[in-house]
Image (cartoon, rainbow, N blue to C red):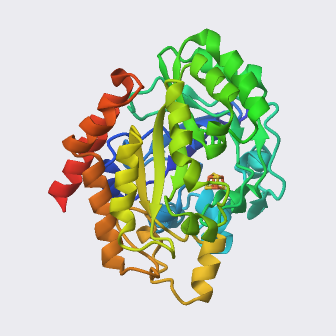
Amino acid sequence: MATAVRTLLLITASSPEIQRVRRRRVLNFQQITMPYLAAFVPPRWTVIHVDEVVRPVDFGLRVDLVAITFHTPSAPHAYAIADQFRQQGTPVVLGGPHVTLMPDEAQAHADVIFAGAAESHWPQFLREFEAGRHRQRYSSTEPPTLEDVPIARKDLFHRRDHTAGVLFATRGCPHHCDFCTLPVMYQSRVRKRPVEAVADEYGSFPGKVIILWDDNIASDMEYAKSLFRALAPHRKWWSSQASIHAAQDDEFLELAARSGCKQLFIGLESISQASLNEVQKPFNRVSDYARAIERIHSHGIAVQAGVVFGFDNDEPAIFAKTLDFLEATGVQNATFNILTPFPGTRLYHRFEAEGRILTRDWSKYNSRADVVFRPRRMSSEELLAGYEYANHRFYSWRSVCKRLSRSPVGLPWTLPLNLAYGFASSLARFQT
Ligand code: SF4
């Protein structure tokens, strides 16, 4: 007897507020969670993926099951979507970072929740759902192996993000920074896909520019080096995220460059050593930063600096000092964030114990437009103004010319990114 075809609607939720904030970034890279999860779904299901960055959810769609993934700032919006589908009689599954951090809260808006890495129980859940005997909660205490994972479904990539494709080689990071959600989500474990499988998927994208969506591509140096050797023959360009350890190993940098690495996002976080120590990131040594950036540059790799403002040791002077440093070292790109104590993190628990959490309206946990805690050595207004100042100064023509004129990295990579971010920064100023 033939099994009836069922329809699954996957939603990558993004609230209107977060889209307004992110629109300033111009470059919104394809999120891989749902196309990856779709690859686990048996062929007897029809799968639709709505990425809210691209198009809105159509509540008139007739589907058998809805699954929604979201980050903290989109949580209230995702709950509203879930509530509406459930009112219409469609069962809803919730998963993703915020659900893992706040499972009990999410449970109130769902028939089923996934806490932790969803792929551990996802195929089992679908079988149980079809048989009408699924559970309300699937928790993965032990993140699953990535030894034999399927390739994400490219037909469900919907964003036009100027890249040829996105994929991941590893998941997780071994470090324990207080403000980061990864140690909570993955218990500081790092999982790795087989190198050959990653290289095959990487080579399967027809275009040139690839994003490796790894949390920290430098979390296992020997694995990374094997991976770079396998990627090199494909002669593509790639970019990924790495901890500062990437800059401490010349062989890593050399192999990365030879395999087509054009840019590394490095979480510098702060140029204040006291601030780094305060959030358990003491392995970032500010005194070594300039040399680290120089070493990365010497291999023809651009640096995108991840910078956070608002640590307890940050004073109002931190903004100008940070910009002076980034310009002096010729950093090609930077992403600035307002410190945000995401629920479940050690930082959140500390601020909560100190009575410094100003709001639990998760839509304000966007790291870019709102300050959600009481800073120690400046006001919320000063923090917000300093963040805006950093964006505007970094992507001003004066700063772009200063940084890129001394850049050892080719303009075909660095200039378009600076123009895109600079345009976004001007747009933000125009809108505010
Ligand atoms: S090094 Fe980066 S990814 Fe790893 S725990 Fe710290 S902030 Fe998170």
Q: Is residue 278 left or right of residue 388?
A: right
In depth, the one of 40 and 415 nearer the eye is 415
Can residue 170 be spotted in the picture?
Answer: yes
Q: Going by the picture, which residue comes out furthest to the left?
A: 430
- Identified at 84% across, 54% down, the residue is 142
**Residue placed furthest toward the bottom:** 355
Q: In which quarter of the view is residue 250 placed?
A: top right
Residue 150, given in percent of the width and then of the height, sits at 72, 29
Residue 330 placement (x, y as % from top left): 39, 39
Picture residue at 39% right of the left edge, 41% below the top: 333
Q: Nearer the viewer, residue 376 or 428?
A: 376
User: In the image, residue 374 lies at what x, y percent?
Assistant: 45, 82
Check the image and report above or below for 184 versus 404.
below
**Which quadrant would the N terminus be assigned to in this image?**
top right
User: How many badges with numbers are in the image?
Assistant: 0
Name the image quarter holding the C terminus.
bottom left
Q: Quadrant of residue 151?
A: top right
Residue ID at (74%, 55%): 186
Instruction: Name above or below for residue 172 compared with residue 386.
Output: above
Image height of 417 relative to 201, above or below: below
x, y percentage for residue 373? Answer: 46, 79
Residue at the (64%, 60%) spot, across then down: 281
Relative to 216, does residue 91 appear above or below in the rendering? below
Note whether residue 95 is visible. Answer: no
Left or right: 147 in relation to 18? right
Q: Ligand 1 shows up in which quadrant of the image? A: bottom right
